[in-house]
Image: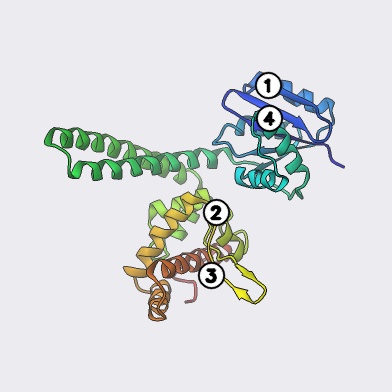
Amino acid sequence: MVTTAGIDCGKCFLDVAVVFSGDKIRVANTPDGHQNLVAWLARRGVAFVGLEASGGYERPIRDALRTAGVSVRIFDPARVRYFAKAKGQRAKNDTIDAALIAEFTASQVAPATTPPDPAREELAGLIKARRLLVDKRVDLRHASAGAPAMAQAALEEAVKGLTSAIEALDAEIRSRVTAQPELADRVAALQTAPGVGPVVATTLAILLPELGKTTGERISALVGVAPFDHDSGQSHGQRHIAGGRADVRHTLYIAAEVAATHCKGAIADFYVQLKGRGKPSKVALTACMRKLIVRLNAMLAKGRTWEADPT
Protein backbone atom coordinates (compact mmCIF):
# COMPACT_ATOMS: atom_id res chain seq x y z
CA MET A 1 0.00 0.00 0.00
CA VAL A 2 1.10 3.55 -0.72
CA THR A 3 1.49 5.59 2.46
CA THR A 4 -0.95 8.47 2.19
CA ALA A 5 -1.43 11.75 4.06
CA GLY A 6 -4.06 14.47 4.06
CA ILE A 7 -3.56 18.18 4.61
CA ASP A 8 -6.18 20.68 5.74
CA CYS A 9 -4.93 23.99 4.33
CA GLY A 10 -5.58 27.27 6.09
CA LYS A 11 -4.22 30.76 5.58
CA CYS A 12 -1.78 30.48 8.49
CA PHE A 13 -1.42 26.78 9.26
CA LEU A 14 -1.39 23.34 7.64
CA ASP A 15 -2.86 20.46 9.63
CA VAL A 16 -1.49 17.11 8.47
CA ALA A 17 -2.44 13.50 9.21
CA VAL A 18 -1.01 10.21 7.93
CA VAL A 19 -3.70 7.64 7.19
CA PHE A 20 -4.12 4.76 9.67
CA SER A 21 -0.91 5.56 11.61
CA GLY A 22 -2.36 8.35 13.74
CA ASP A 23 0.69 10.58 13.08
CA LYS A 24 -0.31 14.26 13.02
CA ILE A 25 1.44 17.59 12.83
CA ARG A 26 0.64 21.28 12.43
CA VAL A 27 3.07 23.55 10.59
CA ALA A 28 2.99 27.16 9.47
CA ASN A 29 1.83 27.79 5.91
CA THR A 30 5.17 29.41 5.10
CA PRO A 31 8.22 28.36 3.05
CA ASP A 32 10.01 27.20 6.23
CA GLY A 33 6.92 25.29 7.34
CA HIS A 34 6.67 23.65 3.93
CA GLN A 35 10.26 22.40 4.10
CA ASN A 36 9.72 21.07 7.62
CA LEU A 37 6.62 19.25 6.44
CA VAL A 38 8.38 17.75 3.42
CA ALA A 39 11.06 16.33 5.73
CA TRP A 40 8.45 15.07 8.22
CA LEU A 41 6.52 13.27 5.47
CA ALA A 42 9.72 11.79 4.02
CA ARG A 43 10.63 10.25 7.38
CA ARG A 44 7.28 8.46 7.36
CA GLY A 45 7.55 7.27 3.78
CA VAL A 46 4.55 9.25 2.57
CA ALA A 47 4.40 9.11 -1.22
CA PHE A 48 0.92 10.46 -1.89
CA VAL A 49 -0.83 13.50 -0.39
CA GLY A 50 -4.39 14.76 -0.76
CA LEU A 51 -5.44 18.40 -0.38
CA GLU A 52 -8.73 20.23 -0.57
CA ALA A 53 -9.02 23.18 -2.92
CA SER A 54 -8.87 26.10 -0.48
CA GLY A 55 -9.06 29.25 -2.53
CA GLY A 56 -5.35 29.25 -3.31
CA TYR A 57 -4.03 28.54 0.21
CA GLU A 58 -3.11 25.03 -0.96
CA ARG A 59 -0.94 26.07 -3.91
CA PRO A 60 2.39 26.81 -2.13
CA ILE A 61 2.47 23.47 -0.28
CA ARG A 62 1.25 21.69 -3.41
CA ASP A 63 4.21 23.09 -5.35
CA ALA A 64 6.68 22.32 -2.54
CA LEU A 65 5.51 18.71 -2.33
CA ARG A 66 5.64 18.17 -6.09
CA THR A 67 9.14 19.66 -6.21
CA ALA A 68 10.13 17.10 -3.56
CA GLY A 69 8.75 14.28 -5.71
CA VAL A 70 5.57 13.65 -3.71
CA SER A 71 2.41 12.90 -5.70
CA VAL A 72 -0.34 15.40 -4.90
CA ARG A 73 -4.04 15.42 -5.72
CA ILE A 74 -6.42 18.33 -5.17
CA PHE A 75 -10.00 17.42 -4.23
CA ASP A 76 -13.27 19.33 -4.35
CA PRO A 77 -14.15 20.02 -0.68
CA ALA A 78 -17.73 18.88 -1.34
CA ARG A 79 -16.52 15.38 -2.21
CA VAL A 80 -14.64 15.11 1.08
CA ARG A 81 -17.68 16.38 3.00
CA TYR A 82 -19.93 13.79 1.33
CA PHE A 83 -17.38 11.15 2.33
CA ALA A 84 -17.65 12.32 5.95
CA LYS A 85 -21.45 12.17 5.82
CA ALA A 86 -21.31 8.64 4.40
CA LYS A 87 -19.16 7.67 7.40
CA GLY A 88 -21.65 9.31 9.76
CA GLN A 89 -18.98 11.75 10.91
CA ARG A 90 -20.46 15.04 12.05
CA ALA A 91 -17.62 16.56 14.06
CA LYS A 92 -15.44 18.99 12.12
CA ASN A 93 -12.22 20.80 12.98
CA ASP A 94 -8.82 21.20 11.34
CA THR A 95 -7.29 18.07 12.87
CA ILE A 96 -10.33 15.91 12.10
CA ASP A 97 -10.47 17.30 8.57
CA ALA A 98 -6.82 16.41 7.93
CA ALA A 99 -7.42 12.80 9.00
CA LEU A 100 -10.59 12.68 6.90
CA ILE A 101 -8.77 13.99 3.82
CA ALA A 102 -6.04 11.38 4.37
CA GLU A 103 -8.58 8.57 4.55
CA PHE A 104 -10.49 9.88 1.54
CA THR A 105 -7.25 10.18 -0.45
CA ALA A 106 -6.33 6.57 0.35
CA SER A 107 -9.71 5.44 -1.01
CA GLN A 108 -9.24 7.13 -4.38
CA VAL A 109 -7.56 5.79 -7.47
CA ALA A 110 -4.89 8.34 -8.29
CA PRO A 111 -4.95 9.23 -11.99
CA ALA A 112 -1.95 10.81 -13.68
CA THR A 113 -2.02 14.56 -13.14
CA THR A 114 -0.33 17.27 -15.13
CA PRO A 115 1.93 19.74 -13.30
CA PRO A 116 0.32 23.13 -12.61
CA ASP A 117 0.96 25.96 -15.04
CA PRO A 118 1.88 29.08 -13.02
CA ALA A 119 1.14 31.41 -15.95
CA ARG A 120 -2.33 29.91 -16.40
CA GLU A 121 -3.04 30.13 -12.67
CA GLU A 122 -2.06 33.82 -12.68
CA LEU A 123 -4.40 34.46 -15.59
CA ALA A 124 -7.17 32.49 -13.84
CA GLY A 125 -6.77 34.77 -10.82
CA LEU A 126 -7.07 37.86 -13.02
CA ILE A 127 -10.18 36.51 -14.74
CA LYS A 128 -11.88 35.68 -11.44
CA ALA A 129 -11.00 39.12 -10.06
CA ARG A 130 -12.52 40.69 -13.17
CA ARG A 131 -15.72 38.71 -12.67
CA LEU A 132 -15.98 39.94 -9.07
CA LEU A 133 -15.55 43.55 -10.16
CA VAL A 134 -18.16 43.19 -12.91
CA ASP A 135 -20.64 41.68 -10.43
CA LYS A 136 -20.03 44.53 -7.98
CA ARG A 137 -20.53 47.09 -10.74
CA VAL A 138 -23.88 45.51 -11.63
CA ASP A 139 -24.94 45.61 -7.96
CA LEU A 140 -24.01 49.29 -7.65
CA ARG A 141 -25.87 50.22 -10.82
CA HIS A 142 -28.99 48.48 -9.55
CA ALA A 143 -28.66 50.22 -6.17
CA SER A 144 -28.29 53.59 -7.87
CA ALA A 145 -31.68 53.37 -9.60
CA GLY A 146 -33.83 54.34 -6.61
CA ALA A 147 -31.23 56.08 -4.44
CA PRO A 148 -31.30 59.76 -3.38
CA ALA A 149 -29.38 62.18 -5.60
CA MET A 150 -26.36 62.40 -3.29
CA ALA A 151 -26.19 58.60 -3.01
CA GLN A 152 -26.51 58.25 -6.78
CA ALA A 153 -23.51 60.53 -7.28
CA ALA A 154 -21.44 58.46 -4.84
CA LEU A 155 -22.52 55.20 -6.44
CA GLU A 156 -21.80 56.48 -9.94
CA GLU A 157 -18.32 57.51 -8.82
CA ALA A 158 -17.75 54.03 -7.45
CA VAL A 159 -18.98 52.55 -10.75
CA LYS A 160 -16.44 54.68 -12.63
CA GLY A 161 -13.68 53.38 -10.37
CA LEU A 162 -14.74 49.78 -10.95
CA THR A 163 -14.92 50.38 -14.70
CA SER A 164 -11.36 51.70 -14.70
CA ALA A 165 -10.19 48.68 -12.71
CA ILE A 166 -11.98 46.30 -15.10
CA GLU A 167 -10.40 48.00 -18.11
CA ALA A 168 -6.95 47.70 -16.50
CA LEU A 169 -7.50 43.98 -15.89
CA ASP A 170 -8.72 43.53 -19.47
CA ALA A 171 -5.54 45.12 -20.79
CA GLU A 172 -3.34 42.95 -18.58
CA ILE A 173 -5.20 39.77 -19.54
CA ARG A 174 -4.91 40.60 -23.26
CA SER A 175 -1.20 41.29 -22.87
CA ARG A 176 -0.56 37.98 -21.12
CA VAL A 177 -2.63 36.00 -23.62
CA THR A 178 -0.81 37.61 -26.55
CA ALA A 179 2.53 36.67 -24.97
CA GLN A 180 1.58 32.96 -25.20
CA PRO A 181 1.12 32.08 -28.91
CA GLU A 182 -0.54 28.71 -28.32
CA LEU A 183 -3.04 30.24 -25.89
CA ALA A 184 -3.63 33.19 -28.21
CA ASP A 185 -4.44 30.78 -31.05
CA ARG A 186 -6.98 28.92 -28.88
CA VAL A 187 -8.64 32.18 -27.88
CA ALA A 188 -8.80 33.31 -31.51
CA ALA A 189 -10.26 29.97 -32.64
CA LEU A 190 -12.95 30.07 -29.95
CA GLN A 191 -14.04 33.54 -31.07
CA THR A 192 -15.09 32.15 -34.45
CA ALA A 193 -18.06 30.48 -32.72
CA PRO A 194 -21.40 32.33 -32.45
CA GLY A 195 -21.88 34.12 -29.15
CA VAL A 196 -18.23 33.76 -28.14
CA GLY A 197 -16.50 37.12 -27.72
CA PRO A 198 -13.03 37.92 -26.34
CA VAL A 199 -14.04 37.67 -22.68
CA VAL A 200 -15.89 34.37 -23.11
CA ALA A 201 -13.11 32.89 -25.25
CA THR A 202 -10.39 33.86 -22.78
CA THR A 203 -12.40 32.57 -19.83
CA LEU A 204 -13.00 29.20 -21.50
CA ALA A 205 -9.37 28.85 -22.61
CA ILE A 206 -7.99 29.66 -19.14
CA LEU A 207 -10.53 28.21 -16.70
CA LEU A 208 -11.23 25.13 -18.82
CA PRO A 209 -7.80 23.95 -20.02
CA GLU A 210 -9.26 20.48 -20.70
CA LEU A 211 -11.23 21.94 -23.62
CA GLY A 212 -10.23 20.09 -26.80
CA LYS A 213 -8.32 17.45 -24.83
CA THR A 214 -11.11 15.17 -23.58
CA THR A 215 -14.48 13.75 -24.58
CA GLY A 216 -17.66 15.74 -25.09
CA GLU A 217 -19.31 13.90 -22.21
CA ARG A 218 -16.52 14.71 -19.80
CA ILE A 219 -16.24 18.35 -20.85
CA SER A 220 -19.99 18.75 -20.24
CA ALA A 221 -19.60 17.29 -16.74
CA LEU A 222 -16.62 19.53 -15.98
CA VAL A 223 -18.66 22.61 -16.86
CA GLY A 224 -21.75 21.29 -15.06
CA VAL A 225 -24.15 21.05 -18.01
CA ALA A 226 -24.34 17.26 -18.29
CA PRO A 227 -27.82 15.94 -17.41
CA PHE A 228 -27.65 13.15 -14.82
CA ASP A 229 -30.16 10.27 -14.59
CA HIS A 230 -32.56 10.13 -11.67
CA ASP A 231 -34.08 6.68 -12.16
CA SER A 232 -35.07 3.87 -9.84
CA GLY A 233 -36.76 0.67 -11.00
CA GLN A 234 -39.65 1.57 -13.28
CA SER A 235 -39.51 5.22 -12.26
CA HIS A 236 -37.73 7.63 -14.59
CA GLY A 237 -37.19 10.99 -12.96
CA GLN A 238 -36.38 14.32 -14.57
CA ARG A 239 -32.73 14.80 -15.54
CA HIS A 240 -30.84 17.60 -13.81
CA ILE A 241 -27.45 19.21 -14.21
CA ALA A 242 -25.21 19.44 -11.15
CA GLY A 243 -21.71 20.43 -10.06
CA GLY A 244 -19.13 21.82 -12.44
CA ARG A 245 -17.17 25.06 -12.57
CA ALA A 246 -19.46 27.95 -11.77
CA ASP A 247 -17.36 30.69 -13.42
CA VAL A 248 -17.13 28.71 -16.67
CA ARG A 249 -20.83 27.82 -16.61
CA HIS A 250 -21.83 31.47 -16.08
CA THR A 251 -19.70 32.54 -19.04
CA LEU A 252 -20.98 29.71 -21.22
CA TYR A 253 -24.59 30.68 -20.42
CA ILE A 254 -23.98 34.19 -21.77
CA ALA A 255 -22.44 32.78 -24.95
CA ALA A 256 -25.24 30.26 -25.46
CA GLU A 257 -27.95 32.87 -24.91
CA VAL A 258 -26.40 35.16 -27.52
CA ALA A 259 -25.84 32.28 -29.97
CA ALA A 260 -29.39 30.99 -29.49
CA THR A 261 -31.33 34.26 -29.59
CA HIS A 262 -29.17 36.81 -31.45
CA CYS A 263 -27.27 34.77 -34.04
CA LYS A 264 -27.96 32.38 -36.87
CA GLY A 265 -26.66 28.84 -37.20
CA ALA A 266 -26.71 25.45 -35.49
CA ILE A 267 -27.21 26.72 -31.92
CA ALA A 268 -30.06 29.08 -32.89
CA ASP A 269 -31.74 26.35 -34.93
CA PHE A 270 -31.41 23.90 -32.04
CA TYR A 271 -32.96 26.44 -29.65
CA VAL A 272 -35.93 27.05 -31.98
CA GLN A 273 -36.40 23.28 -32.32
CA LEU A 274 -36.46 22.78 -28.53
CA LYS A 275 -38.87 25.69 -27.98
CA GLY A 276 -41.11 24.23 -30.70
CA ARG A 277 -41.27 21.00 -28.71
CA GLY A 278 -42.53 22.92 -25.69
CA LYS A 279 -39.30 23.08 -23.69
CA PRO A 280 -39.06 25.98 -21.21
CA SER A 281 -36.55 28.66 -22.17
CA LYS A 282 -34.19 27.80 -19.32
CA VAL A 283 -34.17 24.10 -20.23
CA ALA A 284 -33.63 24.93 -23.90
CA LEU A 285 -30.75 27.29 -23.10
CA THR A 286 -29.11 24.69 -20.87
CA ALA A 287 -29.28 22.21 -23.74
CA CYS A 288 -27.75 24.86 -26.01
CA MET A 289 -24.94 25.36 -23.50
CA ARG A 290 -24.15 21.67 -23.65
CA LYS A 291 -24.30 21.58 -27.45
CA LEU A 292 -22.06 24.64 -27.69
CA ILE A 293 -19.36 23.37 -25.32
CA VAL A 294 -19.34 19.91 -26.93
CA ARG A 295 -18.88 21.44 -30.38
CA LEU A 296 -16.18 23.81 -29.15
CA ASN A 297 -14.41 20.84 -27.59
CA ALA A 298 -14.53 18.88 -30.87
CA MET A 299 -13.49 21.97 -32.82
CA LEU A 300 -10.32 22.54 -30.78
CA ALA A 301 -9.54 18.82 -30.73
CA LYS A 302 -9.45 18.87 -34.55
CA GLY A 303 -7.56 22.17 -34.73
CA ARG A 304 -10.36 23.85 -36.64
CA THR A 305 -12.48 26.99 -36.44
CA TRP A 306 -16.24 27.17 -36.13
CA GLU A 307 -16.74 28.17 -39.75
CA ALA A 308 -14.78 25.11 -40.87
CA ASP A 309 -16.70 22.85 -38.46
CA PRO A 310 -19.59 21.06 -40.21
CA THR A 311 -23.08 22.02 -38.99
Point out residue 224 in the picture as x, y percentages from the top left corner: 53, 58
Which residue is denoted by mark 2 in the rendering? 244
Q: Residue 149: percent from the left, percent from the top?
A: 12, 36
Q: Is mark 4 on a helix, strand or loop?
A: helix
First reached walking from the N terminus: tag 4 or tag 2: 4
Q: Which of marks 1 and 4 is in front?
A: 1
Front in this rendered view, residue 159 or 303: 159
Q: Which of 233 and 25 is in front in this view?
A: 233
Q: Label 1 amino acid?
A: Val
Q: Mark 1 points at which residue?
A: 27
Number of marks in the rendered image: 4
Q: Which amino acid does label 3 sit on?
A: Gln
**Residue under circle 3?**
238
Residue 114 place in picture, x, y as percent = 67, 46
Quarter holding residue 52: top right
Find the distance from the CA under tag 4 to the CA under tag 3.
Answer: 45 Å
Q: Would residue 297 be found to the left or right of residue 167 on screen?
A: right
In this orientation, which residue lies closer to the viewer: 123 or 228?
Answer: 228
Mark 2: which amino acid?
A: Gly
Q: Which residue bears the numbered disc 4?
A: 64
273 relative to 62, above or below: below
Q: In which quarter of the image is residue 264?
A: bottom left
* Residue farthest to the left, as pictured: 149
Q: Is residue 83 visible?
A: yes
At mark 2, the secondary structure is loop
| Residues at circles 1 and 2 in contact by the CB criterion of under 8 Å | no
The residues bearing labels 1 and 3 have C-alpha atoms spaced at a distance of 48 Å
Q: How far apart are marks 1 and 2 (CA)?
A: 32 Å
